[in-house]
Amino acid sequence: MAHFKEVTQQSGLHPKPAGLVLQYGTAGFRTNANQLDHIMFRMGLLATLRSKKTKATIGVMVTASHNPEEDNGVKLIDPMGEMLTSSWEGYGTQLANTEQEELLTTLKDIVEKEAIDMSHEANVFVGKDTRSSSASLSQAVLDGIKALGGHSKDYGLVTTPQLHYMVCCQNTQGKYGEATLEGYYSKLSQAFSQLAKNASNRTDDQKHLRVDGANGIGAIKVRELESHLKKDLQLSIFNDGSRGKLNHQCGADFVKVQQKLPIGIKINPGDRCCSFDGDADRIVYYYTDSKGHFHLLDGDKIATLISSFLKELLNEAGLDLKIAVVQTAYANGSSTYYLENTMKVIVRCTKTGVKHLHHAAQEFDIGVYFEANGHGTVLFSRGAEGKIQQLAADTNINDERKKAAFLLQNTINIINQTVGDAISDMLLIEAILAIKGMTVQQWDTIYSDLPNRQLKVKVSDRRVIETTDAERRAVTPAGLQDAIDDLVKKYKQARSFVRPSGTEDVVRVYAEADTQENADALAHEVSLAVYGLAGGVGDEPKP
Ligand code: G16
């Protein structure tokens, strides 16, 4: 076939370093940018095959999200805007690791196994973040698409969720929205202004939100959004990329893990602030109190705020729809307790990675999913959307039901249902706080987090750790889980687990307990167990 010849020629320009082996991780491939040129070319090939197979537009986003500037990575987007189906991740790993001479054979194998009609047209949308390596790496993706005869549309600099949105708009023939940045901003800002109509009177100070853009793409895009917002929300953007380094001492991951303010933000006690991550698919909120103490409102608090808002609206609308919250092992124990026992909503726990949460959330009429790190969104089933639209159009209902239906309708429009989206989540949170007349401190008091700590341990091969029970228990190496169980028994209200990261070359350790001191001590002791039993490298973890 003609295209295969082209692939052979072009792949020579994007050679694979012999012997290099990379795994498809939590959100695609991610490592130092120097090792990724061939991966990008090959993911261009894979996306083209996926497009031919699904007869739909596929997305490829060049980003390493929360990782340091030197890294890069790639996320693949399936037709409805969701992450690439897990059954194709294996093909990704195969293509990534095939030596140069075998590339064509591997490609043909996939075509055969999936019975792909190669005469079918392929369309791929491509986007990139602000990393200096992203320009040439996204060119490598475009080269891969072209080599297999696919059509591409290069969106250039966009947030990851914006690209997910474009793919969904394209494949729903515009039903989800218009596949342009303008379409994205107008859909979200119009829904926000509708919701804000129901807000109580607020001072300029109350409308003010401070945004830490992590020196990344989110800062650029939230500025573009600003011009579409009326006076309902006033933004001050910090870490906008004009000076600092991407994700360095700033951004959602830094703020969540370090539990402290990002660099470069100026705030007074009680000011409402939020941080995006490097590709703007995560958001966390925070403030400081009059004693200067830092208070974090992470993905768990966000899920609680959104799900309680939706539950109230469903009650007021008189709609009987099943709502659930999906979390991961990182969810604070207090949040799970509050959701299950006070709010009485169904709670599910999945493995880390939005692809897992997304699928679990699809099982309900309304699925609110959030990772504690601030990555999440809300999914409305088609049936639920239909019932809400029907009610909103009903002229025979009372004002309370009408208002609830209107708010639900606009919540659907403001949410990016394809994936977690810092900008869309920010607008929804701001709208809820405005409608409820709630301060960030009042939101924070819904429940109190158990003190917790996250650490990283370097080991020679993190794959020696295998987990089960939604990553809450380690199966290998032998003795590790017993050691964790014994350590946990020493503390009150304690819980701890370890898992290999799928985006960084580390093992992650999570611990929570009744006091910060105990959470810190437990996390440290578990880190030592990982270091000792799972092949720790470098210095032993220090307290
Ligand atoms: C990605 C995934 C998230 C995950 C995070 C950390 O986020 O999309 O679902 O929580 O990595 O994963 P791990 O603990 O396996 O390193 P992002 O925002 O970095 O793309």
Image (cartoon, rainbow, N blue to C red):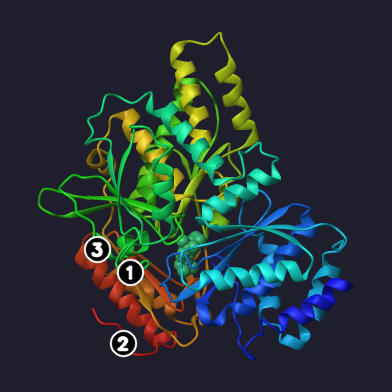
The residues tagged by marks 1 and 3 sit, at their Cα atoms, a distance apart of 8 Å
* Residue occupying the far left of the picture: 291
Residue holding disc 1:
248
Q: In the rendered structure, which amino acid carries the disc numbered 3?
A: Ile
User: Which residue position holds label 3?
Assistant: 263
At 79% from the left edge and 53% from the top edge, which residue is drawn? 55
Q: Secondary structure at mark 1?
A: loop
Establish whether ligand 1 lies closer than 8 Å to the Cβ of label 2: no
- Examine the rendered structure and indicate whether residue 413 appears above or below residue 459: above
Q: Secondary structure at mark 3?
A: loop
- Name which of mark 2 and mark 1 comes first in the sequence: 1
**Residue 97 place in picture, x, y as percent:** 67, 82
Disc 2 vs disc 1: which is toward the camera? 1
Residue 94 location (% of width, % of height): 70, 77
The amino acid pointed to by label 1 is His
Where residue 251 sits in the image (x, y, percent)? Answer: 35, 61
As shown in the figure, which amino acid type bears the numbered disc 2? Glu
